[in-house]
């Protein structure tokens, strides 16, 4: 995707499912999800090992448990787990997958694109958001979190 397409995706998105979100503050997934929540996005923690809320939001064990439309599925899992996440993202009708910095899986990316999902790979969503979204264009937080 071009930077303009990524910018458009970030402006249009409202709900981000964070697959592999950790409840440990020192983990990158925790910091990125917190930043995105403060930027106004609804985050949904997706991790079967979480026992309580993260950033004030109750987790789900898998994408298939989510009951609201998901704009972006953000992936904080090792590459070998990406194909399964992509299949679940396709099943729930997500609009895009975003593989965080250091996560690359070309076959899964091609599968997602063939199914009509937008794909961002090997990129930090928080860094891209800070760089591409002017403050005036950022979503207004609906509160909570």
Image: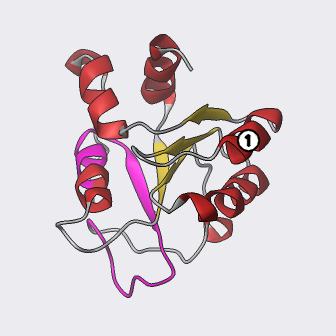
**Along the line of sight, the residue nearer the viewer: 97 or 34:** 97
Q: Can residue 100 be seen in this view?
A: yes
Extreme residue toward the left, this view: 26
Can the viewer see residue 133?
Answer: no
Locate residue 138, reporting x and y percent: 30, 26
Query: Relative to 11, is 115 on the left or the right?
Result: right
Q: In which quarter of the image is residue 81?
A: bottom right
Residue 86 drawn at (x, y percent): 69, 53
Looking at the image, residue 80 sits to the left or right of residue 128; the answer is right
Residue corresponding to mark 1: 112
Quarter of the figure with the C terminus: bottom left
Furthest toward the bottom, the residue is 51
Of the pair 99 and 68, the residue shown nearer to us: 99
Q: Examine the rendered structure and indicate whether residue 54 appears above or below residue 90.
A: below
Q: Measured from the top left, where is residue 20 in percent x and y? A: 45, 66
Left or right, 79 with reference to 10 = right
Please say whether residue 134 is one of the residues in the magenta stretch: no
Q: Which residue is drawn at 18% across and 68% down?
A: 25
User: Residue 104: image x %, image y %?
Assistant: 55, 45
Neighbor class of circle 1 (other Cα within 10 Å; few <14, some 14-19, many 20+) is many
Q: Residue at x 43, y 46 (%)?
A: 100
Q: What stretch is highlighted in magenta?
A: 34-55
Vertical comparison of 27 with 2: above or below:
below
Quadrant of res 119 = top right
Residue at figure coordinates x 49%, y 34% from the top left: 13
- Look at the numbered disc 1 and give the secondary structure of its residue: helix
Q: With 67 as the anchor, is 21 left or right in this view? A: left
Relative to 8, say whether 116 is above or below: below
């Amino acid at each position: 995707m071009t930077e303009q397409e990524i910018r458009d995706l970030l402006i249009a998105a409202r709900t981000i499912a964070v697959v592999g979100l950790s409840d440990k503050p020192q983990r990158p997934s925790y910091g990125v999800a917190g930043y995105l929540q403060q930027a106004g996005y609804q985050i949904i923690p997706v991790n079967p090992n979480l026992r309580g809320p993260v950033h004030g939001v109750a987790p789900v064990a898998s994408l298939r448990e989510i009951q609201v439309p998901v704009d972006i599925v953000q992936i904080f899992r090792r590459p070998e787990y990406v194909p399964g996440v992509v299949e679940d993202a396709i099943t729930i009708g997500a609009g895009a997958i975003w593989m965080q910095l250091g996560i690359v899986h070309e076959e899964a990316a091609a599968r997602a694109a063939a199914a009509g999902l937008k794909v961002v790979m090997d990129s930090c969503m928080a860094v891209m958001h800070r760089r591409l979204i002017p403050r005036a264009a950022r979503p207004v937080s609906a509160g909570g979190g």
